[in-house]
Image (cartoon, rainbow, N blue to C red):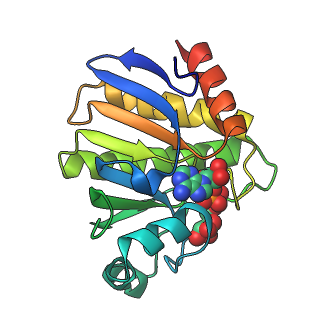
C-alpha cells in the first residue's frame, strides 16, 4: 500500500498525487514554479535549472528580452537534461493576503500551463504546488484552486490524459489529498 498516492478520474483523464521531486519524474512536460523575471531561484526553479542544465536559462533569454513572464502566465522551453520534453515555466502569485485576487492569478497560472501543454500535444504533465513555497500562498487555499483548474482541463478531453502533482512534503500532499476528496 502506498498512502502517498491518490488519484481520481476526470472525463477521459486521470489526476494523481504523489510525494517526490518533480525533476525525477518522466513526463511530456513539467511545470516549473518560476518568477516574472525568469531568472531562476530556489525551490522547484532551482532544481529545474540544476538538473536541466544551463541551456534552459539560455533558452529563457528570448522571453526575458521580451519583458519576462507576468504573474498568471507561462512560457515554454525544451527539457534538455530533465526527463521531460518540455518545461513550462509558470508564474504563480505572491500571497499578499487578499484572497480572491491571488486565487484568480493562481488559476491563470495553471490554465496557462495547460494551454501550453495542449499546444505541444502533451499527454502526461507534472505539476508542483505553485506559489506555496517562497511565494507563501497557504496550501489549504492553493490546493483546491490547483486541482479544480487542472481537473477541469482533463475533463475537456484534450491531449492531456495524465496530470501528476509531484509534491515535496507530506503536509502538502495531505492538503492536496483532502482537496481532491472534496472535489470528487
Ligand atoms: N519537486 C517538487 N516540489 C518541490 C521541489 C521539487 N524539486 N522543490 C520544492 N518544491 C515544493 C516546495 O516545497 C513548495 O511546496 O514546491 C512548492 C512550491 O515552492 P517554490 O518552488 O518555492 O515555488 P513558489 O512558491 O511558486 O515560489 C516561486 O521561488 O525559487 C523561487 O524562482 C522562484 O521566485 C520564484 C519563487
Q: Is residue 138 above or below residue 178?
A: below
The residue lying furthest to the front in this view is 1
Q: Can residue 155 be seen?
A: no
Question: From what the image shows, is residue 44 above or below residue 137?
Answer: below
Name the outermost residue toward the right. 97
Residue 117 visible in the snapshot: yes
Above or below residue 19? Residue 1 is above
Q: Residue at x 26, y 30 (%)?
A: 161
Q: Taking the image as four quarters, which one is ligand 1 found in?
A: bottom right
Residue projecting furthest to the top: 184
**Residue 60 image position (x, y, % from top left):** 37, 79
Which residue is at the front of the view, 37 or 128?
128
Q: Residue at x 30, y 57 (%)?
A: 83
Q: Nearer the viewer, residue 48 or 61?
A: 48
Dividing the picture into quarters, in which one does residue 146 lie?
top right
User: Where does residue 155 sit, x and y in percent of width and height?
Assistant: 33, 22
Please provide percent x and percent y for residue 149.
Answer: 47, 33
Whether residue 86 sits left or right of residue 15 in the image: it is left
Amino acid at each position: 500500500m502506498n498512502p502517498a498516492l491518490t488519484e481520481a478520474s476526470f472525463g477521459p483523464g486521470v489526476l494523481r498525487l504523489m510525494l517526490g521531486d518533480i525533476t525525477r519524474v518522466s513526463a511530456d512536460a513539467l511545470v516549473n514554479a518560476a518568477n516574472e523575471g525568469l531568472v531562476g531561484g530556489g525551490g522547484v526553479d532551482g532544481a529545474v535549472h540544476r538538473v536541466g542544465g544551463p541551456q534552459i536559462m539560455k533558452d529563457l533569454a528570448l522571453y526575458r528580452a521580451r519583458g519576462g513572464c507576468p504573474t498568471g502566465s507561462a512560457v515554454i522551453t525544451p527539457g534538455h537534461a530533465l526527463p521531460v520534453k518540455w518545461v513550462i515555466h509558470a508564474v504563480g502569485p505572491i500571497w499578499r493576503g487578499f484572497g480572491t485576487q491571488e486565487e484568480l492569478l493562481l488559476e491563470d497560472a495553471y490554465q496557462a500551463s495547460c494551454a501550453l501543454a495542449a499546444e505541444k500535444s502533451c499527454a502526461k504533465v507534472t505539476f508542483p504546488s505553485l506559489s506555496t513555497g517562497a511565494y507563501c500562498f497557504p496550501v489549504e487555499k492553493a490546493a483546491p484552486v490547483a486541482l479544480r483548474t487542472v481537473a477541469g482541463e482533463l475533463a475537456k478531453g484534450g491531449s492531456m490524459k495524465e496530470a501528476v502533482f509531484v509534491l515535496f512534503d507530506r503536509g502538502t500532499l495531505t492538503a492536496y489529498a483532502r482537496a481532491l476528496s472534496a472535489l470528487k
